[in-house]
Image (spheres, coloured by chain):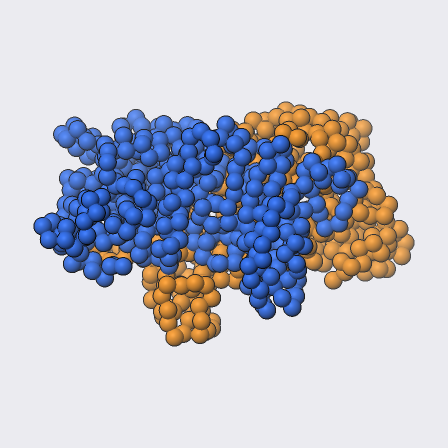
Chain colours: A blue, B orange
Amino acid sequence: MERLQARYEIETPLSLERAAEVIAGEQSCGTFMRLPGETDVLRDRAGARIESLVETGQSDHPSLPCRLSGDVYRRGEVVLSWPLDNFGPSLTNTLATVAGNLFELAEVSAIRLLDIVFPQSFANAYPGPAFGISGTRRLAGVVDRPMIGTIIKPSVGYSPEETAQIVNRLVDGGIDFIKDDELQANGPHCPLFARIDAVMDVINRYADRTGRKPMVAFNITGEVDEMRRAADHVSAVGGTCVMVSLHSVGLAGLGALRRHANLPIHAHRNGWGLFSRSPDIGITYPAWQKFWRLAGADHLHVNGIANKFTETDASVIASAQSVVSPLFAQGPGYEALPVFSSGQTAVQMEPTFHAVGSGDFLFCAGGGIMGHPDGIEGGVMSLRQAADAAMQGIPLDRYAEDHRALAAALNQFASKRI
Amino acid sequence: MERLQARYEIETPLSLERAAEVIAGEQSCGTFMRLPGETDVLRDRAGARIESLVETGQSDHPSLPCRLSGDVYRRGEVVLSWPLDNFGPSLTNTLATVAGNLFELAEVSAIRLLDIVFPQSFANAYPGPAFGISGTRRLAGVVDRPMIGTIIKPSVGYSPEETAQIVNRLVDGGIDFIKDDELQANGPHCPLFARIDAVMDVINRYADRTGRKPMVAFNITGEVDEMRRAADHVSAVGGTCVMVSLHSVGLAGLGALRRHANLPIHAHRNGWGLFSRSPDIGITYPAWQKFWRLAGADHLHVNGIANKFTETDASVIASAQSVVSPLFAQGPGYEALPVFSSGQTAVQMEPTFHAVGSGDFLFCAGGGIMGHPDGIEGGVMSLRQAADAAMQGIPLDRYAEDHRALAAALNQFASKRI
């Protein structure tokens, strides 16, 4: 029978084995006392199992507040497995199992979900990204290089018409992709449908003129019926992408949109810091992103190298590599397009290219484009030139010698150099 | 113009004021550099504002990993406000604003959302609980005392028929409310529709016989369309409640169910520990529960006094009181029914009654009923007797002198005494 595996880092005042037993019991057929119905047959059928257990360290104090105490707090990695019969190939119910009550246990003073291995049945149950990397490239008309994107900034405060004016300047500057900020959805000052109409008017005229249609990710985050209507409207006026804030809509919300919309879904991870900021509680990005890819995310935010936030480059790189790793041993890989953003400029293009190992990514810069001394066109051009340099293996400074936009960017954003 | 307020606890290597400015900028119209479009007019219209700021402590080291560093890390509370025009009365987009990228900022070494004040417009936009406390009492036929509930245990491993047999014993024992465990949803070994049918057959026969229909919360957590179909089926066969895991379905998922189903929604908080376990990152329960009540949760889990997990009693009590506090200054209060569970027995009834300040709560015991020496009937009776004692202001030990079931429970669960 198929089993689902999850790997955790835990810390406990008990033995690692005892803590693992408590987690396995709490998350399957056990409770705080053994009950008459909990027969050996039932435990065999429904119980979670400890697959492996490795101690990695000790401390004399608990990392998080913990009701139970001990002289030593042992840290380690434990792999648990569950029979798929308990919950079936259901993302929502898997989440409640592998990331549910266990975070509250008094038997652990730290617990993080490090990874999860979905059995093959999930491939039949979930469609995954409808467009992914190749579908996005096709719609955006970008064949063989990283896609250059940007976020409308300031994030909020523009009217639909002002937004469309910015979009006009951006597409004239040669941008491939534009997204709403996650703070800009459907507020009274910039209603979504009016913004879609004003922006798509610009995009469609540009496409008629040039034969190339830049992709715009409209932030349609909202209630399920609102999102479905909004996606229909984006399609109706020729749009090619929608965006949602994953933690706001939830797995069921994303699933409902995936089944309805025939557009790539640009998945924003805002709120992610709550899951990752502490080394003692949470879920790693490689584990987290698997849920959202299965549910249908086409593009996944991974922050950026030398970002304005606090995440390390190593963590960003691991995240980016995780979204392009196959989900199952057999069949399609469910790869999503990694999206880099947050304080990005031409300076970060080359290390990003090497982190991904190919040009299959979307590189979003806000200030890194708008703040270029030659304006938007110079900003976009500097990013394309940086990508060209990276793809050809030419050092940035040398390539900048005869590429003016790149040279200006390197000068302007020197403080970003890694 | 209406503004939405949120209160945070933060820690920062900068001045508190500078950190608050960065958060306000990041979560409204700012970015890492001031852009041409960010005019004073636009900032006035769309900018988040610092309403107040109080320093509460200092430390010489950061509580969480933080890219920026300082000699002193200042801790304090800050209240920010946003113009409602930015996002409108939308729960999903409010969440992205008040609990979004800010958790990743390098300018804070700790950040927790302590509270949020929704402006009155949200009362028009969101229906809130359809049944709440009074509607639940009416459906369950319990007028003037705490409702006594239980969880099917073992959580997983029973077939639909075995589940129905347990339910039969529970209702014969006088239980008011039964819920699926959050681990039991729609797995192949115990398919949801078969379980609903088998259990409701027992419930309907009991109701025909006695005129009283105990409430069963079927765990319908799943994709939106699955939940809608399951809720329809529960209604069709005479069921009176559905349950969902909030973090699995998300705000949009719960909203879709609320708009469709004509049943109380029993809201399970599993995964909550991830939001609350660290004192340095997360969202407090009083802030978190407001989102779910607005979205339509009728019953909200608040853990239990002297629970088997690690949460303190003070925290549990604050949570319980928060779900019965009015959400708005005017109009209906959107009160939800607080649900106590986790290692609960007759011993915890009296302190629970005093914590809530009334009998308006649901008291769920698993082992505290099943593990009673006189079996289920004795377990339920002991909880009712404990509730009677609490409501009459009679000390538990004295009441137990001539109430056999209670006396046996006190003896059996003596280790639970507070």
Name above or below for residue A71 compared with residue A158: below
Tell me residue A397's x, y (percent).
16, 55
Q: Nearer the viewer, residue A68 or A17?
A: A17
Name above or below for residue B70 compared with residue B321: below
Tell me residue A174's x, y (percent).
17, 40
Name above or below for residue A159 compared with residue B396: above
Q: Nearer the viewer, residue A261 or B7?
A: A261
Q: Nearer the viewer, residue A198 or B167?
A: B167
**Is residue B254 in view?**
no
Q: Is residue B349 left or right of residue B18?
A: right
Q: Is residue B361 left or right of residue A397?
A: right
Task: Give the number of marks.
Answer: 0
**Is residue A415 in view?**
yes
Residue drawn where x is 51% and y is 29% of the image: A125
Q: Quadrant of residue A5?
A: top right
Q: Nearer the viewer, residue B360 or B106?
A: B106
Residue drawn where x is 31% and y is 44% of the image: A357
Residue drawn where x is 54% and y is 42% of the image: A95
For the C terminus of chain B, the quadrant is bottom right
